[in-house]
Amino acid sequence: MSINLSHQQRRILAYSIPVLAVFAALIFGAIMLVLLGANPIEGYAEMFVGAFGSGDALIATILKATPLLFVGTGIVIAFRANVINIGAEGQMVLGGLFATIAALYLPEMAPIIMVPAVLMAGILGGALWGWIPGALKAYYRVNEILSTIMLNIVAVQLMSYLLRGPLIDPAYKEVVGIAQTERLMESADLPIIFGDRFHIGPVLAILGAIATYYLLWRTPLGYRLRAVGLSEHAARYAGIPVRRTIALALTLSGAFAGLAGAVLVFGSESHRMVDAGSAAGFTGSAGFNGIVAALLGGLHPIWTIPASFLFGGLIVGGQALQRAVQVPSALIIALNGLVVVFVVAADRYRVKLLSVDGRDQEIADDGKMPLDDGDSALGSVYDAAPSGTDSYGQDEFNEDPR
Amino acid sequence: MSEIFTTAVLVAVGASAIRLAVPLLLAALGETFGQRSGVLNLGVDGIMLLGAFTGYYAVLKTDNVWLGLLAGAIVGLVLGLASAVIAVTLKAEQGISGIGIFLFGLGMSDLLFQKLVGTPIGIDTFPQVDIPLLSDIPYIGEIFFQHSLVIYLAFLSIPVATFVINRTTFGMKIRAVGEYPDAADTLGVSVAGVRYATEIIGGTLAGIAGAVLAITLGIFQQNLTNGAGFIAIALVYFGAWRPTGIMLGALLFGFVNALVLELKTLEIIPRDLSNLAAMAPAIITILALVFVARRFRAPSALTKPFTRGT
C-alpha cells in the first residue's frame, strides 16, 4: 500500500472500510435477487424505507439494534483481551432463561425491584455461560472458539427442554408445538419510555457501552484486560494475573450477552420466552451479528453504538425487502452470512491502514486502535500457554534453542 | 431393560453407528488437512449444507446417486476455494469468517430448496453392497459389511490420508506450513499455495460429506446437518489432528447418535427428555477438548495468516 495518504485521510479511509464491505455484500445480494427474479433496486429501496423511512421503522430499527449493542459491547471486551467469543448465542439463551425463571418463581414485587431483579438474573445466566469457556481456556487451555460453539448447542437444547417441559405455559401443555412460557409477571415488563413499545432497553444498552469505554480505558481492570490482549507474555511479566483476566473477559462478555437475552424476553411484545426451535429463533442471530457490529465499530464500545444502529437497520430493512419482493426469508440468513464474511475479510485492511503510519502508539492510547502492525490481536488464540505448565510441550516449541 | 438390549437391537445400533459416522468422518478428515497447514475453517457446516442440497437436487433430477455425489463435491470444491481466498489471501480472522460461511450455507441451501423443490420429495439412496463372505458372518457381517460403497470408501480414505500426510512430499509441506511457515517459505515452499490446496481438499470433502448425508437419508430439509459440521471440527481436536484418532472419534459420535436414536424409537428416552439426550455430543466434545488440550498440541501456525518477513 504505497499510495501516499495523510494521516487524516488514512484514518477516514480506515473507518469507511467496514461500511464499504457491507456495500460489497449488498451488491452480492443484488446479484442473488436478480437470479431470484426480483428487482434489486426496488428491493433495496424497500429495505431503506423499511429501516429508516418512518418513525415506526426507526423504532423497530433501534429495538433490533439493542441486543446487537449489548452483545457487541461484550464482544469488544473479549476481543480486546484477545479472546474470541463465538458463544453469545448461547449466553443470550441462558440470560433469557435465568431471567424467565426469576420472573416465574420470585414473588411479585414492585417494578422498581422486579425489573432490576430479572435483568440481574439475565446477567448472571450469561456470565455463567461465559465463565465456563473462560475458565476452560484460562486453566485448561481449551480453545474457546470450539467450547463456545459447543455451549451454544447445549444452551439451545436446554432451552427447548425447559420451554417444552418445566417452564411451559400450563394453558398450552396439551397442545403440541407451542413451546413458550405463560405471560410473565407484568411488574417485570421493561418500562415503556414512549409510544407503545419503545422500552428502556436501548437506553441501557447505550449506558452499557459508555460504561465499558470507561472500564476499558479508565480503570486498572480495563488496563489489565487490554494488556493481556496486546501481549500475554508482557502482561505476565508485569505481574498481571493473566489466567484470571482471560476468564473474567469471557465472563463479562457473557454477562452483556445475558443481559441482551433478558431484554429480549421482557421487552418483547408477548412478554413470554418462546422457543422457535433454534438459537436463532430466540436470538435472531444477534449473538453472531453482535460480533459484526463490534467489528463495524472498530472494536470500540462508543463506535459500536452507531454500528449497531446501522446493522439493526440492515436486519429490519432486510425483512421489509423480503416481504416486498416475495423471496423466502432464508435469503436474509444467506445475506447476513455474506455481510459477516465481507466485514471480517475487510477488517485486516482497516488495521493495516491505521498502523503503517507509525502512529500506532498514540492511536492505541486513545483507545481507537488496539492492534499492532500486521498481526491482528485476535491472531494468536492457540498459543495461550500459561507459563509453568508445559504439559503439551508448548514452551519447548516456542523457545528457540539457539 | 434387559429384554430391550437384544442382540438384534445391538446389531442395528452398531450398523447405524457406522453409517452415521461417515459424514462426520469425511468432513473432519477434510478439516484436518486445512488445520495441519494452519487454517481453521469454521464454515464446514455451511459447506456441508450446500453440498447436501446440491447432491440431493442432482439425484432428484437425474436419479443417479453418483452424479449427486459429484455435484456435492464440486460445490464443496468451489466453497473451499472461496474459504481459501477469505482466509489465506484476505487474511480474515478465521474464527469469525467461518461463521459467515456457515450462515451463508445455512440460508442459501434453504433458499435454493424452497425455490427449486419446495415440498420434501424422497430420492434414491446409495445401493447396499454386501461384501462377499464377510457379510455372512453372524452379527459382525451385518454391522460392518452390509453398507453402501461410499461407506467402505470413506473408511478406506483414513489410511490414504495418513499416508498422504505422513509419507508424501505434499504431506510434509502441509505439516511444515502448519508448524513453521517462515522456515517453509525460506525453503521455497509456497505457504499460500499449500494452504489453498488444503482448503480445497477440505471443502471438497465437506461437500461430499453433505451429499453423502442427504443421499443416505434420501431427503433434504432446512438445516439438515443440525450442527454436524461443527462436531466435525471438534473431532479434529478430539482426534489430535491424526486421521486414525478422528476415525475413532467419528465412530464414538456415530455410536452415541445411533444409541440415542434407538432409545428414542424404543421410547426408553421419553420424548420430553430427547433434548437433554441431544446435548450429549456437545458435552462429550467439551470434556474431550479438556483431555486433548492437556496431552496434544495444535499446529503452531493454526489460525495465523502468513505474511513474509514478520
Image (cartoon, rainbow, N blue to C red):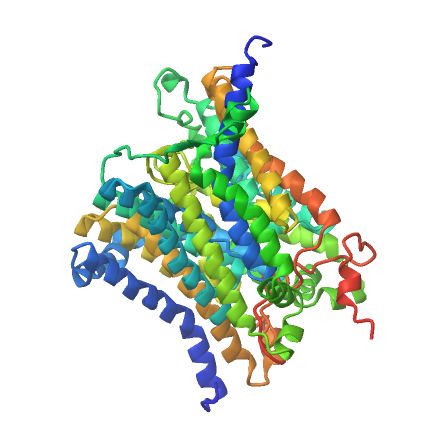
> Which residue is found at the position 52% from the left and 34% from the top?
A99
Pick the residue in front: B211 or A117.
B211
In percent of width and height, residue B186 lies at 64, 79
* Residue sitting at the far front: B133
In percent of width and height, residue A280 lies at 41, 42
In percent of width and height, residue A2 lies at 48, 89
In the rendered image, the vertical position of residue B246 relative to residue A52, given as above or below: above
> Which residue is found at the position 62% from the left and 48% from the top?
B237
Note whether residue A158 is visible: no
Pick the residue in front: A201 or B289.
B289
Quadrant of the drawing holding the C terminus of chain A: bottom right
In the rendered image, the vertical position of residue A391 relative to residue B212, given as above or below: below
> Which residue is found at the position 36% from the left and 54% from the top?
B75
Pick the residue in front: B255 or A236.
B255
Note whether residue A185 is visible: yes
* Residue sitting at the far bottom: A4
> Which residue is found at the position 57% from the left and 31% from the top?
B280
For this view, does B31 lie left or right of residue B125? right
In percent of width and height, residue A63 lies at 37, 49
Residue B176 figure quarter: bottom right
For this view, does A344 lie left or right of residue B125? right
For this view, does B124 lie left or right of residue A259? left
In the rendered image, the vertical position of residue A377 relative to residue B281, given as above or below: below
Residue A12 figure quarter: bottom left
Residue B310 figure quarter: bottom right
